[in-house]
Image (tube, grey):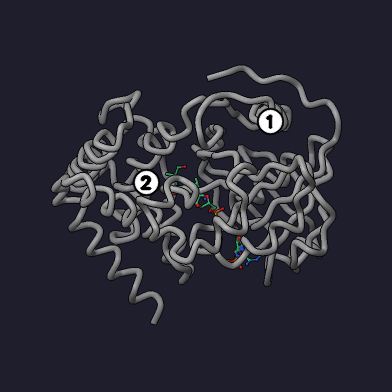
Amino acid sequence: MATTQNVRTAQRIAVVGAGAIGGYLAVRLANAGHCVSVVQRGQTLQAIRDRGMVLHEGGTTLVAHVPAAARCGDLDKQDIVFLTVKATGLRAVAPDLALLLAPHTRIVPVLNGIPWWYSRDALPILDPDNGIANAIPHARIIGCVAHVSAQMAEPGVVRCIAPGKLVLGEPGGGLSQALHDAASLLAQAGIAVCASDDIRQEIWTKLIGNLAFNPISALTGARMDEIFASPELIGLARQVMLEGMAIGQATGIHFPVDVDRRLDMARAIGAAKLSMLQDLEAGRALEVDAIVTAVVKLAAQHRIAAPTLKTVHALIKERARHLLY
Ligand SMILES: NC(=O)C1=CN([C@@H]2O[C@H](COP(=O)(O)OP(=O)(O)OC[C@H]3O[C@@H](n4cnc5c(N)ncnc54)[C@H](OP(=O)(O)O)[C@@H]3O)[C@@H](O)[C@H]2O)C=CC1
Ligand SMILES: CC(C)(CO)C(=O)C(=O)O
């Protein structure tokens, strides 16, 4: 982990997908004096145009009257782009992102699960036709893991349930000036952040929690605190996490925490409704491929049995399929 330097000048920042995480970032960055615009669709786009983007966090409310566009092409070139649509929405927005890019612009996709850029060869399921990779140059990406819990209370209104922190990292590892600058930008906006020289380790450390808790929450309807209150559910989550750690280790990941410490991190989120449950309740596509299927594929490639994970995967895959009909 590295400390960050100050970014002193106002930056041109686009947030593509002003939902829970995107809205949180947009409001905080706009309130820190940056030139923030959002790209959004539907009711939320109209709500942001009418009332601004609203963030409720810990008893305070912040509002940002930011330009809101329906298309990337309606905005100028940016200094930095936060890509905050769900994994299931990436393919649709990717082709237009190039319109936001000046020669120096970096793109920060904030995603749960394994991102499309992680390994094209091992995980074609995350970007089957290479449509995302072809549209977003790999060299522009700064990886991001969000230990934050936020929810859309209504269109244009975000409730931050647990502010947590963001971790940024270069996809290939190591530190860079661009990484420090992006982290500094967020830190100055009051967002806890650190720059990691090993974003893949950070992705897996977060992922093993999502791997267990997101499908369990979506299958049962339980919030995080309710999962912890059930010995059966927490036993199931623990087993899925252990299998996930074995798969990550087989791919070369060294986990900085053991399963009990990782469970403590999840417990600290409290009464949060996990994002997969939020999606299910709203009738939206579930991020099953990025969070669960990708790990199941890696288990097969590395000949790891993972029987509990495979059972959970079969259940959540079917649940997600029925949502589409
Ligand atoms: N929410 C959370 O607490 C956390 C989420 N994450 C991860 O962060 C990522 C973002 O999640 P989250 O913020 O919850 O997602 P949301 O669904 O709340 O936000 C995504 C937003 O993008 C908009 N969008 C999608 N496609 C388009 C499009 N083609 N054009 C314009 N706007 C579009 C959606 O609009 P519409 O509403 O119309 O669909 C939605 O408002 C996910 O990978 C998630 O797993 C990580 C940590 C915590
Ligand atoms: C567990 C949590 C809230 C942590 O940020 C999350 O990632 C999710 O809801 O998908």
Q: Which mark is residue 178?
A: 1
Q: Nearer the viewer, residue 143 or 309?
A: 143
Q: Establish if 129 lies above or below 121.
A: below
Q: Is residue 277 visible?
A: no
Task: Specify which label sits upstream in the sequence, 1 or 2.
Answer: 1
Amino acid type at circle 1 is Ala
Amino acid type at circle 2 is Asn
- Is the residue marked 2 within 8 Å of ligand 2, measured from its CB? yes
Residue at image coords 50%, 39%: 145
- Is the residue marked 1 within 8 Å of ligand 1, measured from its CB? no
Residue 308, percent from left and from top: 16, 51
Residue at image coords 51%, 44%: 149
Label 2 packing within 10 angstroms: few (<14), some (14-19), many (20+): many
Residue at image coords 66%, 20%: 4
CA gap, disc 1 to disc 2?
Answer: 28 Å
Query: Residue reaching furthest bottom?
Result: 325
Q: Are marks 1 and 2 in contact (CB under 8 Å)?
A: no
Q: Is residue 253 visible?
A: yes
Residue identifier under label 2: 210
Q: Establish if 282 lies above or below 22.
A: below
Q: Nearer the viewer, residue 304 or 83?
A: 304
Q: Nearer the viewer, residue 119 or 126?
A: 119
